[in-house]
Image (tube, rainbow, N blue to C red):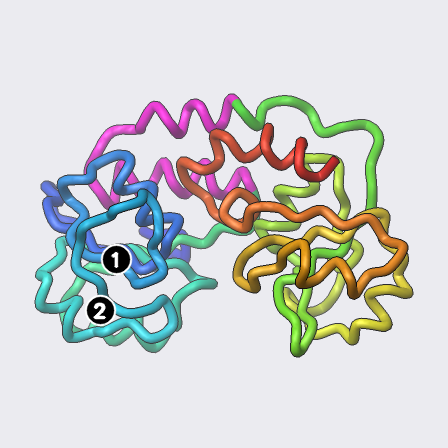
């Protein structure tokens, strides 16, 4: 069964994999690259990835996926739409859905996905990622808001992988208790919360030194890699060291 509890009929040998999630694409490419035959247009790592493209995570080309004859399609409960997952399953394809909201989820889910859905061994990079995150969280903690979009402003709320990554680095999300996972919050309210830090990733919205910090006068802002903050996969190996540096 996948992370959602759905039974998935995986063949004993998996030779053709389509991934609908950038993080999972990078994970497969780093482990069994010869099996990866399809990925979304947003799958940017590793650089130079030469596989069939099947549009985006929210609007995959279902016919193109079927024509690739995958042994398994990899998806994610947050990134991909239920309707697309169900349509692929109704077409007879095996779809393995991950659900990842914490670092611990990521390590467990990736291990199961690679061993059970991709029929390959546990990769060395996953061991290295767990080791990289083994250090205890800092005793001194800071509060933060994590904008992910503007026009309208949206932030990371409850039960997000992003929030859990920052928690492990000693940074507590001020909106972790919000009823929504990615709430829309007016800019004046964000500023009035007076967080110890404003964390501005370069994806999904491409915040930069000239686009974002000017909205938070008097507040310390940290520009960080969205891939290192939000992706679960080989990027987890370097993420803690680089994020600690960039968070200041």
User: Residue 188, position in %: x, y?
Assistant: 85, 72
Which residue is drawn at the image coordinates 63% and 56% (left, top)?
208
User: Residue 115, position in %: x, y?
Assistant: 27, 36
Work out whether 109 lies above or below 206: above
* Left or right relative to 209: residue 192: right
Marks 1 & 2, CB-CB < 8 Å contact:
no
Provide the secondary structure element on which disc 2 rests: helix
Q: Which corner quadrant of the image does residue 94 belong to?
A: bottom left
Residue 39 is tagged as: 1
Q: Main secondary structure of the magenta part?
A: helix
Counting other residues with Cα less than 10 Å from the Cα at mark 1, is it few (<14), some (14-19), or many (20 or more)? Answer: many
User: Residue 132, position in %: x, y?
Assistant: 53, 24
Work out whether 65 lies above or below 120: below
Going by the picture, which residue comes out furthest to the front? Answer: 210
Which residue is drawn at the image coordinates 15% and 52% (left, top)?
37
Q: How many numbered discs?
A: 2
Residue 19 lies in the magenta-colored region: no
Give, as a single range, the part of the protein colored magenta. 103-131
Asked whether the viewer can see residue 157, the reply is no
- Of the numbered discs 1 and 2, the one sitting upstream in the chain is 1
Residue 89 is tagged as: 2
Which residue is drawn at the image coordinates 17% and 64% (left, top)?
93
Q: Which corner quadrant of the image does residue 43 belong to?
A: bottom left
* Left or right relative to 62: residue 194: right
* Quadrant of the drawing holding the C terminus: top right
Residue 114 lies in the magenta-colored region: yes
Which residue is drawn at the image coordinates 19% and 39% (left, top)?
33
Front one among 179 and 224: 224
């Amino acid at each position: 069964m996948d992370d959602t509890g759905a039974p998935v009929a995986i063949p004993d040998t998996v030779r053709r994999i389509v991934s609908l999630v950038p993080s999972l694409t990078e994970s497969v490419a780093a482990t069994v690259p010869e099996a990866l035959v399809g990925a979304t247009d947003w799958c940017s790592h590793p650089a130079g990835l030469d596989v069939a493209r099947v549009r985006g995570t929210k609007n995959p080309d279902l016919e193109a996926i079927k024509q690739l004859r995958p042994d398994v399609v990899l998806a994610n409960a947050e990134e991909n739409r239920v309707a697309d997952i169900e349509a692929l399953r109704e077409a007879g394809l095996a779809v393995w859905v991950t659900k990842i909201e914490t670092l611990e989820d990521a390590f467990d889910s990736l291990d199961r996905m690679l061993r059970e859905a991709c029929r390959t061994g546990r990769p060395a990079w996953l061991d290295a990622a767990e080791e990289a995150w083994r250090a205890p969280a800092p005793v001194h903690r800071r509060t933060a808001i994590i904008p992910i979009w503007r026009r309208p402003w949206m932030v990371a709320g409850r039960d997000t992988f992003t929030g859990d990554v920052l928690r492990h680095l000693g940074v507590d999300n001020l909106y972790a208790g919000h009823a929504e996972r990615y709430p829309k919050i007016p800019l004046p309210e964000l500023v009035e919360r007076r967080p110890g830090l404003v964390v501005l990733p370069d994806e999904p919205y491409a915040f930069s030194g000239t686009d974002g910090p000017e909205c938070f006068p008097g507040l310390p802002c940290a520009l960080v890699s969205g891939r290192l903050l939000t992706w679960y996969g080989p990027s987890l190996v370097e993420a803690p060291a680089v994020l600690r540096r960039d968070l200041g």
